[in-house]
Image: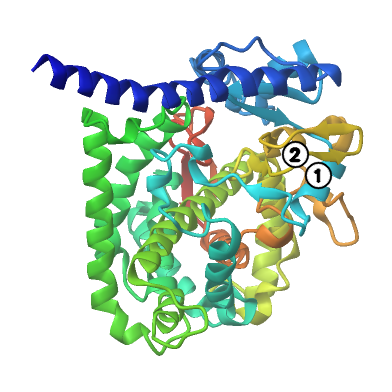
Amino acid sequence: MAALLGILLAAFLIAAVPFALRLLHSFLWVPRRLEQRFRRQGIRGPPRRLLSGNAADYRDLLAAAQSAPLPSFHHAVVARVAPHYREWPERYGRPFVFWFGPRPRLVVSDPEVVKAVLTDSTGTFDKAGSGGGNPLARQLFGEGLVGLTGEKWARHRRVIAPAFNMERIKGWISEITAITSSMLDKWEVRDVAHAEFEIDVSKEFHTLIADVISCVAFGSSYKEGKRVFQLQEEQLKLTILAMRTVYIPGFRFVPTKKNRCRHMLNQEVRNSLRKLIEINGRKCEDSNNLLGMMLSASKLGSEFRMGIEEIIDECKTFYFAGKETTANLLTWATLLLALHQEWQNKARDEVLQACGKSEHPNAENLSNLKIVNMVLKETLRLYPPAVFLNRMVNRDVKLGKLDIPAGTQLQFPILDIHHDVNIWGTNADEFDPSRFAEGKSYHLGAYFPFGIGPTICVGQNLAMVEAKVALAMILQRFAFVISPSYVHAPMHGVTLQPQYGAQVLVREI
């Protein structure tokens, strides 16, 4: 027995020593070497803890910033949503570096660097993947387009991109208007004797866009996909928690209560999507929607063949990302027009001139909505869906004066750049859609709510058309102001959203 125990102990040590050495290399040697390289360039940041880096500092800053709502509805929101983009540069300068575990995140706000990295085609800069490298945070999107890199990303992109070209989206406008009209009819029922009534437009728009995405991308309805959306809301809470925590290798396999819940939710989402694909697959197979194109690519002999599990992953991505991006864009745009009545009136006058009081927007008159387009672009500047973009540096590289070592995660603070007075002027925190009037231009690396370059959001065209159609139809039928019950507290979950809902007072016109 003693001999057996000795053998087992020896085997354990043989396995454990290399693992311990790898941990020491990853958590001690590599971070120290990178830290010294940054310091030689004058790049500093908050003091790094050995194992967790600055994860706790980040969480403390965020908790303090979001402990109370903003005192009024203004748009200087960076310090509340992402306080480290304001507090740490004041202490350590720009660019600055902070650490999540052993990995550095170099925060760079220079539009020239943003443009150079995001438009690079050499493979030097990889997408960091969804969840920031934490496998517990990746379950929300699965192995869909958002989290993929390399050849697999390119193959999926070639299949999916044609489903979202502008000509195909124009063919979906009638479905979008029908679904939006159904929502507005329900609003009208609540308008008793032309009195104002309160609506949380955030909830309304999440249901609206969920229905649109289900219909035009998957050939189903919100009712059919409702369970998927509910499960993804539960996944979202666990994803946010994981994204703010340093991941310990192998921890996802530990059967904790949260890990068991993650596994259960993931399995139920996948099973629900598999059933939806079975139900809708046959009628979609010959169609030009997203599901139809992926199913065509799943056939033997297809150049870019996709298996059923890959299709499920892409459905997960578009069910969530497609809904969140557009629903939050519409929410913030409505709140901004409710606050800035002069722009609401300008936008309404334009819509009535282009579409009349009762004609739905269509592919022809939608292009005449210049002011509505300006409003949406300015909304995306002030309240972009994504607060930042990450890129992983695969090899040592020079960017201007920066000497960036391999293994660094570059972070581009979209929200901070979009509010930079050096780029947008002293009124950077003010709502001014005229910035985007025809003929006016901006630096490519200074405005990128959907990203830029080869990895620009594949659903950008659909998101903008959905938002233009919905906003135009609302302006045709209703006027709205901020409700006294609205509390201005923008927060970053996976997207930028109002923490306590988006209440407006609405009346029929």
**Viewer-closest of 291 and 149:** 149
**Do the numbered discs 1 and 2 sit on residues whose CB atoms are within 8 Å?**
yes
Q: By what rule are the colours in the image chosen?
A: rainbow
Instruction: Judge by depth and name the residue closer to the eye, 389 or 128.
Output: 128
The residue carrying pointer 1 sits among few (fewer than 14), some (14 to 19) or many (20 or more) residues within 10 Å by Cα, namely: many
Amino acid bearing label 1: Ala
For this orientation, the residue located farthest to the left is 1
In this rendering, the answer to whether 254 lies above or below 349 is above
Instruction: Identify the element where label 2 is drawn.
Output: helix
Side of 453 relative to 54 (left or right): right
Q: Residues within 10 Å of mark 2 (few under 14, many from 20)?
A: many
Q: Is residue 439 left or right of residue 109?
A: right
Above/below status of 394 relative to 429: below
Q: Which residue is mark 2?
A: 418
The residue nearer to you, when weighing 105 against 344, is 105
| Identity of the residue drawn at 61% across and 63% down | 468
Q: Position of residue 331 (x, y in %)?
A: 52, 47
Q: Upstream in the sequence, badge 1 or badge 2? A: 2
Query: How many circles with numbers are drawn on the protein?
Result: 2
Picture coordinates of residue 479 (x, y %)?
55, 52
Q: Position of residue 441 (x, y in %)?
A: 88, 54
- The residue lying at 26 percent from left, 70 percent from top is 276
Numbered badge on residue 446? 1
Can you tell which quarter of the image residue 110 is in? top right
Query: Along the horizontal axis of the image, is 118 left or right of 116?
Result: left
- Determine if residue 482 is in view: no
**Can residue 137 be seen at all in this image of the molecule?**
yes
**Callout 1: helix, strand or loop?**
loop
